[in-house]
Amino acid sequence: MNRAELFEQIKKKGSYLCVGLDTDITKIPKHLHSLADPVFEFNKQIIDATNEFCIAYKPNIAFYEALGPKGWESLQKTLDYIPKNCFTIADAKRGDIGNTSSLYAKAFFQNMNFDSLTVTPYMGEDSVKPFLEFAGKWVILLIHTSNPGSIDIQQLETRYGKYIYEEVIFASQRWATADQMMYVVGATKADKIGTIRALAPDHFFLVPGVGAQGGDLEAVSKAGLNSQCGLMVNSSRAIIYASTGEDFAEAARKEALSIQLEMLSHLQNI
């Protein structure tokens, strides 16, 4: 899905919601556990309930890797089930020396056919470039995350008076354009989103942390929206675990609708 197609879906649905499929086998409703593939069945019902109100799905790969081969099977079935008008994100946070990155890219872009992949940029250009060699695919670089430890490296000042995360933004804009690269910017650091938007006015931001982690959608939207929206705001637990009972899908639908309606009001201002 290219930039124009993504923006078209945003306009059509009045939403920039990304639903995180952080599907924990220990948290899904008990009545699903007797099924042959409870993880996929849970995801399937979540997708059916929410795809009207979101423009992207983001499976967190760790939840599937931890289940071994069966987890990878559930992941592929989930990916195949996601409607074609929804952007797909492999939240795998890969990044290594060139030949290893090339194989990671092949795994997620060629074999599994995700639209995008989250990538850690801190090994430098040669660890990111292999992911950029796949036409029509997106790299989503981790820039400024919400976890407390982000201050340990991302917010260190360099000898040039810039933060490390700012230097990564400057460097990465030499590697690819805003038509192939996005940035991860945590929602709980909304004050930084405006700063980063000034450094990257045209890029899409993937913004996790709205909902259970406490990020504020209004603050994120005011700081981050650009003329083509430029945001995909992720909510995971607040949607998929809105209920742990047999009504989990309906509860997820209500939560997604509530977020979409607020997003629609913000989109009217761009």
Image (spheres, rainbow, N blue to C red):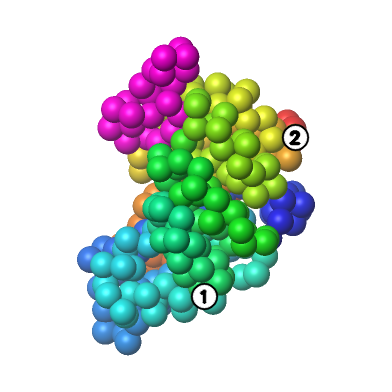
Distance between mark 1 and mark 2 Cα atoms: 34 Å
Asked which quadrant contains residue 208, the reply is top left
Q: In the rendering, at what x and y percent does residue 231 appear? A: 60, 41
The three-letter amino acid code for the residue at tag 2 is: Ser
Is residue 14 shown in magenta? no
Placement of the C terminus among the 4 image quadrants: top right
Placement of the N terminus among the 4 image quadrants: bottom right
Examine the rendering and report whether any part of residue 103 can be seen.
yes
Question: Which of labels 1 and 2 is toward the front?
Answer: 1
The numbered dot on residue 227 is: 2
Residue at the spot x=55%, y=61% of the render? 88
Examine the rendering and report whether any part of residue 259 can be seen.
no
From this view, report whether residue 28 is shown above or below residue 15: below
The numbered dot on residue 111 is: 1
Most frequent secondary structure within the magenta stretch:
loop
From this view, report whether residue 262 is shown above or below residue 162: below
